[in-house]
Every structure is written in structure tokens, then in C-alpha cells.
Image (tube, rainbow, N blue to C red):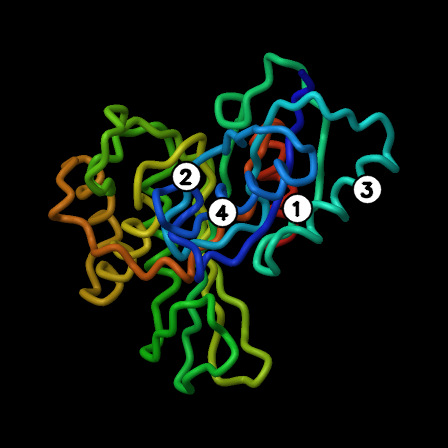
Amino acid sequence: MNRYLISFEYEGRNFFGSQKQPDKRTVQEEIDKAICTLTKENTKIIMAGRLDRGVNAKCHTAHFDVLYQINSKQDGFSFLNSLNAILPPDISVFKIERKDSAFHAQKSATFRHYRYIIRNSFIKPVFNKNVLFIRKPLNIELMNEAIKHLVGEYDFSAFKSVSDNPSTICHIYFANVLKKPLENGTGDYIEINIIGNRFLYNMVRAIVGTLLMIEKDKDNPLKMKEILNSKDRTLAGHNVEPFGLTLIKTGYENPHDYIKKLEKQIN
């Protein structure tokens, strides 16, 4: 059998999440069907992680095993073109790599980079579907001070929705809030970047909701640390809408090297 890693992007609005579910349209189901159609083999992809309904991805990954062989770079291009011709327009596979049998899309991943985008403007948006719109000006400095308290290895139970995952320890390598002015001068895009080794169910959405709660109440940024240490989900903010959240990258390289490159881009 040949093991391949694929990297793909999709808009999550019209999916019931990434993981296959009975009688629901999911990303995994669409990719499974396309690969089986192309290779004429019954295979299932193993995804690097599960994304909630409505969450987007710019670089999600999965591996699969088939007898089908890709022997050259040109073969890889042909495979991608054929696969994307079968896939619906809201999914695109943009990379395929041969891997050895020890590689695992989920277990071999070293980090995940999530980004939540808020349009902070006094004018409602028309074209920005995948952002959260907030009219009231946000205190970015306060939000940035608060989110820094999450960097490190901690128990993130306070930001976990109910799930069957017993492990609540995550290591956050990088957390940052920045703003970029809108082209029309009516406000800013607020980008919340979080990079960690793993994330709990709805964790990023709960963190963003807590940031907005702290900002709204004009609390001390240390409130974030208090909530983290409490391990009490009832003290944190609500889960914000999923459509503002995007998985930017599932990475297999050294996370600190990736963060250095990211810092150069945003500074």
C-alpha cells in the first residue's frame, strides 16, 4: 500500500463539520468519495483533526492508503487536477505527498494555527461572510494583554465544550491579537492568532468569546489567567460564531521556526 498526505482548503459554511457523520454533508465524506472515484479503491482518509460545523480551513491535512501509485511530479499534478474536477467547488486539494507507513496525519502533526477574524466597523459588511461583525470599537491592547496569559502548557478545561476527550492539557506556543485597517477607512479587521500542539472541542471559539467578554466588561487582563486556572467552563465567555474561524495550517515542522516566520509577517 502507498500512503499519501493531502493538503486541502475549504469553506465550512455549507458543511456539518469536517468529520464524517450519518446523513450529513461533511468534508471527509466529499474527499473520500472523490478519492474512491479516482483510484477505484475503497479507502477512507484519516484527518489531522476535527473541525466544527461552519469552520473554514486554508490548510487542513489528511492521509490515506491506496495501491494507486503516483510516481512523478507530473503524476501528482494530474492526480490533483482530476481530484479537484470531482470535488465540489467549496473544497480544493492543493498538495499531495508520498509518506512512509509510520506517518500519521494527526499523530505526526506538531502544531495547528487557528485565526479568528472580526470586522470591527461602524458600517455593516456586505461581502465578508467569514468574519464576525462587531460595531463597537474594541480595545485591542487589553485583548492582547489578556490572551498572552494562555501561552504555555496548561489544563484548558475552562475553554472546553462537552466532549468525550479525556485529555485537557494543551500547549499554546503563540497567541496574538492585531488589527489591520479596512480599505474603506470605516474600521479594522481584528485578527486573533493562536498556535498550539492541540486544541479541545470549541476551545478557540471559547477563548475568543472570553476575550470579548473581558473587553466588554473592561476587566483586568489577569481575568483570563484566573479563568484558565479555575478550570471552570461557566466562568469563561460563550462560544463565538464558527464562521469567523479558520484553520490556517496544520504543521509538521518545528513550530518555533514557523512562529518566527509568522512574526516577521505581522510585525
- Give whichever of discs 4 and 1 has the lower sequence position: 4
As measured in the structure, the alpha-carbon distance from the residue carrying label 4 to the one carrying label 3 is 21 Å
Q: What is the crowding at mark 4: few (fewer than 14 residues within 10 Å), some, or many (at least 20)?
A: many
Q: Amino acid at mark 3?
A: Phe
Residue ID at (33%, 40%): 150
Q: Amino acid at mark 2?
A: Arg
Quadrant of the image for the C terminus? bottom right
Work out which residue is located at the far top of the displayed protein and give it: 102
Residue position marked by numbered label 3 in the rendering: 77
Residue position marked by numbered label 4 in the rendering: 27
Quadrant for residue 134, please give it: bottom left
Please count the marks in the image: 4
- Element under disc 2: loop
Residue position marked by numbered label 1 in the rendering: 93
Rendering coords of residue 71 (x, y %) = 84, 25
Tag 4–tag 1 contact (CB < 8 Å):
no
Residue position marked by numbered label 2 in the rendering: 50
As measured in the structure, the alpha-carbon distance from the residue carrying label 1 to the one carrying label 3 is 11 Å
